[in-house]
Protein backbone atom coordinates (compact mmCIF):
# COMPACT_ATOMS: atom_id res chain seq x y z
CA UNK A 1 0.00 0.00 0.00
CA UNK A 2 1.33 3.45 -0.88
CA UNK A 3 0.70 6.41 1.35
CA UNK A 4 1.67 10.04 1.03
CA UNK A 5 3.63 11.28 4.02
CA UNK A 6 4.68 14.92 4.29
CA UNK A 7 8.37 15.11 5.17
CA UNK A 8 8.98 18.50 3.51
CA UNK A 9 9.89 20.49 6.59
CA UNK A 10 12.25 18.44 8.71
CA UNK A 11 15.00 16.68 6.75
CA UNK A 12 18.17 16.24 8.82
CA UNK A 13 21.62 15.01 7.94
CA UNK A 14 23.72 13.15 10.49
CA UNK A 15 26.32 15.21 12.31
CA UNK A 16 28.69 12.27 11.70
CA UNK A 17 28.60 12.84 7.94
CA UNK A 18 30.62 16.08 8.04
CA UNK A 19 31.17 17.43 4.52
CA UNK A 20 30.86 14.00 2.91
CA UNK A 21 28.24 13.95 0.15
CA UNK A 22 27.55 10.22 0.62
CA UNK A 23 25.04 10.27 3.42
CA UNK A 24 21.41 9.69 4.17
CA UNK A 25 18.97 12.28 5.48
CA UNK A 26 16.08 11.45 7.78
CA UNK A 27 12.77 13.15 8.53
CA UNK A 28 10.26 12.23 11.21
CA UNK A 29 6.50 12.19 10.79
CA UNK A 30 3.97 10.99 13.38
CA UNK A 31 3.76 7.42 12.02
CA UNK A 32 6.87 7.03 9.90
CA UNK A 33 10.49 7.98 9.29
CA UNK A 34 11.59 9.13 5.85
CA UNK A 35 15.00 8.32 4.38
CA UNK A 36 16.55 9.91 1.30
CA UNK A 37 19.89 10.33 -0.44
CA UNK A 38 21.32 13.73 0.50
CA UNK A 39 23.10 14.25 -2.81
CA UNK A 40 19.98 13.45 -4.86
CA UNK A 41 17.04 14.48 -2.70
CA UNK A 42 14.65 14.76 -5.63
CA UNK A 43 15.14 11.07 -6.54
CA UNK A 44 12.56 10.01 -3.99
CA UNK A 45 12.31 8.81 -0.45
CA UNK A 46 11.72 5.66 1.52
CA UNK A 47 9.24 5.72 4.39
CA UNK A 48 9.50 3.13 7.15
CA UNK A 49 7.58 2.72 10.38
CA UNK A 50 9.09 4.16 13.54
CA UNK A 51 9.55 0.70 15.05
CA UNK A 52 11.35 -0.52 11.94
CA UNK A 53 13.60 2.55 11.93
CA UNK A 54 14.42 2.03 15.59
CA UNK A 55 15.43 -1.56 14.82
CA UNK A 56 17.61 -0.40 11.93
CA UNK A 57 19.41 2.09 14.17
CA UNK A 58 19.98 -0.57 16.87
CA UNK A 59 21.36 -2.94 14.21
CA UNK A 60 23.68 -0.24 12.79
CA UNK A 61 25.04 0.61 16.24
CA UNK A 62 26.15 -2.97 16.93
CA UNK A 63 29.86 -3.51 17.37
Image: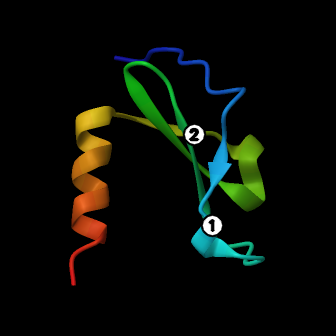
Colour convention: rainbow
When the figure is inspected, residue 50 is found, relative to residue 43, above or below; the finding is above
Q: Nearer the viewer, residue 5 or 43?
A: 5
Quadrant of the rendered image containing residue 1: top left
Question: Helix, strand, or loop for circle 2?
Answer: loop
How far apart are labels 2 and 1 at the CA level? 20 Å
Task: Return the x and y of residue 50 as percentages of the image width and height.
Answer: 31, 34
- The residue located at (30%, 69%) in the rendering is 60
Task: Return the x and y of residue 16 as percentages of the image width and height.
Answer: 58, 73
- The residue located at (73%, 47%) in the rendering is 41
Left or right of residue 60, residue 41 in this image = right
The mark closer to the camera, 2 or 1, is 1
- The residue located at (76%, 42%) in the rendering is 42
Task: Return the x and y of residue 15 as percentages of the image width and height.
Answer: 63, 66
When the figure is inspected, residue 37 is found, relative to residue 27, above or below; the finding is below
> Which of pointers 2 and 1 lies earlier in the amino acid sequence?
1
Q: Quadrant of the C terminus?
A: bottom left
**Residue on which disc 2 sits:** 45
Left or right of residue 38, residue 3 in this image = left
Task: Return the x and y of residue 14 as percentages of the image width and height.
Answer: 59, 62
**Residue on which disc 1 sits:** 15
User: What is the crowding at mark 1: few (fewer than 14 residues within 10 Å), some, or many (at least 20)?
Assistant: few
Amino acid sequence: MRASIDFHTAWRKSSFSGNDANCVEVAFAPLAVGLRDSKNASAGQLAVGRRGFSGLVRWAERP
